[in-house]
Amino acid sequence: MTREDAHDALDAARDGVPLPESLITQALQATGDVPRGKVLTLEQIYARCDEVGDCRIWRQSCTPSGYPRVKDGYAHILAWEHVHGPVPAGKRIYRTCRDCRCCEVEHMVLKTPKQINALAVKAGAWSGQGRIAKITASHRARSTILNDELAAEIRTSSETGPEIEARLGISRSMVSKIRRLEAWAPARRASSIFAGALA
Ligand SMILES: [Zn+2]
């Protein structure tokens, strides 16, 4: 690779073009900024990381997009190469812990850029508010929404707590709260049909 090609490749990578990581490493070496033959060992890479949970988070400088940078290329790629050999063309390293600064080889798998995009979309859809909304919706679909009439029915029913839980999907602890008038108590609800009778 010529120096010019190498600079073009690095510019493209900085602009977000998804190039194979082996090509980026090659380009970094071809620019001549990289002293050849002075490659960190896996132990040296791990020594430059902080152990956070079971991740090894790169402590030293990162690229603008947050990748752990070393003079020889990228720290996480070097770590991978020490264990598994070069990253094949068309494949990229995907961090299963989803932290791009993590150099723990156990947290790396090879994926195509297309697979990585699909995983990112899925991760976005299942994080934060989106995830909470989906869980709430699936809980609602499985259990009955409580209302005053249902609470009244639960109080007069001869069924046990577990039987009501099985039939309506309302937890037995909520059933006992309703029966002890600690939840959905009619006297405290102006709209309840019992409000007048119990006042
Ligand atoms: Zn990790």
Image (cartoon, helix red, strand yellow):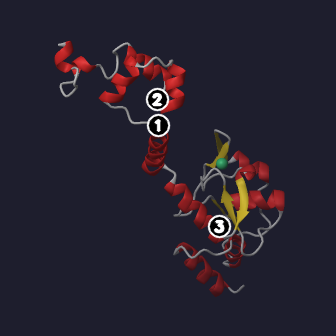
**Above/below status of 97 relative to 171:** below
From the image, state whether disc 2 or disc 3 is nearer to you: 2
Q: Which residue is mark 3?
A: 115
Q: Which residue is mark 1?
A: 143
Q: Is residue 96 left or right of residue 162?
A: right
Which of the 4 image quadrants contains residue 32? Answer: bottom right
Question: Camera-side residue: 1 or 91?
Answer: 91
For residue 72, say whether it is visible. Answer: no
Element under disc 1: loop
Q: CA distance from mark 2 to mark 3?
A: 40 Å
Disc assigned to residue 114: none
State yes or no: discs 2 and 1 in contact (Cβ < 8 Å).
Answer: yes
Question: Camera-side residue: 175 or 139?
Answer: 175
Question: Camera-side residue: 174 or 131?
Answer: 174
Which of the 4 image quadrants contains residue 122? Answer: bottom right
Please, what is the three-letter code of the amino acid marked with disc 2? Answer: Ile
State yes or no: discs 3 and 1 in contact (Cβ < 8 Å).
Answer: no
